[in-house]
Image (cartoon, coloured by chain):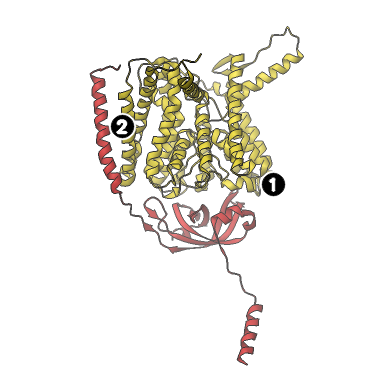
Chain colours: A yellow, B red
Amino acid sequence: MLFRPRLVDYKIIGFYTGKLTTGIGLLMLLPMVISLCCREWSPALDFAFGASVSAILGFALIFSCRTNREMSWIHGIVVVPIAWLVAMVLGAVPLYLSGHFASFLDAMFDSMSGFATTGLALVQDLDHLSYGHNFWRHLTMFIGGQGIVVITITLMTGGAAGLYGMYVGEGREEKILPNLKHTARIIWLVSLVYLVFGSLMLWLVGWEIGMHPARALFHGVTNFMAAFDTGGFTPQSQSVLYYHSAAYELALVPLMVAGGINFSLHYALFSGRRRELLKNTEARTLAATIGLTFMITAAGLTDISGYSHAMAVFRRGFFQIVSAHTGTGFQTVYGPQFADMWGPLAVVGIAFAMGLGASVGSTAGGIKALRINIVTKAFLLEAKRLVLPQSAVLFAKYHHLKKNVISERIVLNAFLIGSAYLLTYIVGGVAGTFFDYPFMESFFESISAAANVGLTTGITMPDMPDALKVVYVVQMWVGRLEFLSVMALVGFMVSAVRGR
Amino acid sequence: MRKTTLFMLFLIALLVPTTPALAAVSSTELIENSKAYDGTTVEFQGEAIGDVMVRGESGWVNLHDGSNAIGIWASAAELREIRTAGDYNSIGDRVLVEGVFHLACPTHDGEFDIHAETLAVVKPGSRITHTVEPGKMIAAAILVPVAVVLFLFERRRRRYGVGGS
């Protein structure tokens, strides 16, 4: 029997959504400061407007829904998808006011793309966008990559069960430390350490390749956010093609890989347990699938593309594979080149890399290496069971910080989430073909949206059908949250209508 | 007699071999028909955007023609003729290049680029004046104080520990 939620349940959800909403407003003060420093008065007003609207809405929810009741697991998990939708709408306000979007839907598309660390973009005339707005685009990725909820947990007190529900609802499963707040702080500490060193490295490389030092610094910080949070926005319209530099691409590769690695593994490395990197099942699987998909792509490129030597194949192919596999979405080729020049085999390699994704507990999207490993081992185990005596005791295990035995529940979880991703890829692909886009490009774009990658073959343009924009927005949203919290929200809504 | 002379001159004009003038191509044409243009000399015009990246004797500039930006590899001396590159505050110099287009440049590890043989600024860039819309100012002037008051109210409430229902 379904239980209809009571008023207090709505109040708890409203109260915590309000808290997250005020947080979004507070974060808009950062690009406002950037705009003021750059004497961009109109953009500064856009952020003042956006921050005020967020704060007023947030406080209105806090005041009207205030309650002493603690947030439970289900409240926490339902708050997350709602808060992400609210963040999408509010994050779009300053973007739309910039005048660089054809409609508010386009601004919401970019806002969700940023928060979900996807990188597909509908912004127009990006090369003349203000520094403030450009910074906000990248900051949404930095916030969304670490998690809107993770920020809140860092600052909040009380409601332990509900906070854990929120944490899980945002696509994270494991706690790095026993205390959730300490876990959230570790995630931010790791990210900020990488922010300093990563931005510094990109700044120096940008300066070295001929950029103005101040612009190199801006590009360094924004590109770091896009690389480490596996987002894929860039400050210029040409993506990474803009730099025409192997050194810049080389500097981005380790940042993308770092973004695709589980935060627990980062913490283990920070704590001096460097051997964990070699033993970790997920890191090894990720390395293997990067190698495998690169070989597929390289074979395709060598076969039919116009690249005349091995270095060209390696530079273009490897960068795109790392970008796809980690879910970043940086491009060093124009979108239409995938279909026109790279050929089917190379594109299949890229599509596989996008669909597989990087690590659980990272900023990346997609099915993820650990799940691939678990499901593969479960299949092999079942195959062994068929040929060995019935009395044989069989089990599989994986190494993640310690040795873990693969239980049926773990296999089921990995299989269900993997299947949900595959289904989402198919739905988006069918939607693309419904709007008369070619089959291969439709599925490529769909995988890119649902796995939060951001590579495009050229379908994602301001003039694409609005319905397809909505499909991609939903794909980005459910893909980033890994389905669980969205399904909980749907269940909550059903019980609100049909429950007793 | 005059008609015959004119006719003869017309025939001669048709028969004299002429150097075909380069047709200017757009970025969309280059991207969509890249195989057809690969290795040919093209004329491309666009706004210099972002940075002029001089690296030793040569360097890069990206030219945006309204649809896409294309990377241009040119000599440092020619690149220094570009005074303004487009960004939020400026419209960049309009630059005309004539050069060899590469779908996958053999000297730049497969770059999609044009190696400029000649580069000229055809229209200097200019500064963009951004006006602040009065509507934005009025909206911000109303909403910012409201948000600040609500923030202070909530802070005061938390300090004195008033509970909820």
Q: Residue beneath label 1, please?
A: A304
Q: Position of residue A99 (x, y in %)?
A: 39, 47
Q: Nearer the viewer, residue A224 or A164?
A: A164
Q: Nearer the viewer, residue A12 or A22?
A: A12
A206 is higher (above) or lower (below) than A428: below
Q: Mark on residue A417?
A: none
User: Considering the numbered disc 1 on the image, is that residue within a helix, a strand or a loop?
Assistant: helix
**Residue type highlighted by circle 1:** Ile
The 10 Å Cα crowd at callout 2, few under 14, some 14 to 19, many 20 or more, is many
Q: Quadrant of residue A412?
A: top right
Ranked by sequence position, the earlier of labels 2 and 1 is: 2
Q: Chain of mark 2?
A: A
Mark nearer the viewer, 2 or 1: 2
Q: Residue at x 58, y 56 (%)?
A: B29
Can residue A147 be seen in this snapshot?
no
Measure the alpha-carbon separation of dots 2 and 1: 57 Å
Q: Measured from the top left, where is residue B158 in percent x and y?
A: 26, 21
Q: Residue furthest top?
A: A391
Name the residue type under label 2. Ile
Instruction: Using the rendered view, name the quadrant where residue B10 is placed.
Output: bottom right
Question: On the image, numbered disc 2 is attached to which residue?
Answer: A56
Label 2 residue SS: helix
Q: Is A25 above or below relative to A399? A: below
The chain ID associated with circle 1 is A
Query: Farthest residue toward the bottom?
Result: B1
Q: Residues within 10 Å of mark 1 (few under 14, many from 20)?
A: some
Could you say where residue A270 lies in the image, as x and y percent from the top left?
47, 23
Q: Closest to the observer: A305 or A192?
A: A305
Q: Is residue A375 above or below residue A86?
A: above
Image position of A355 (left or right of B90): right
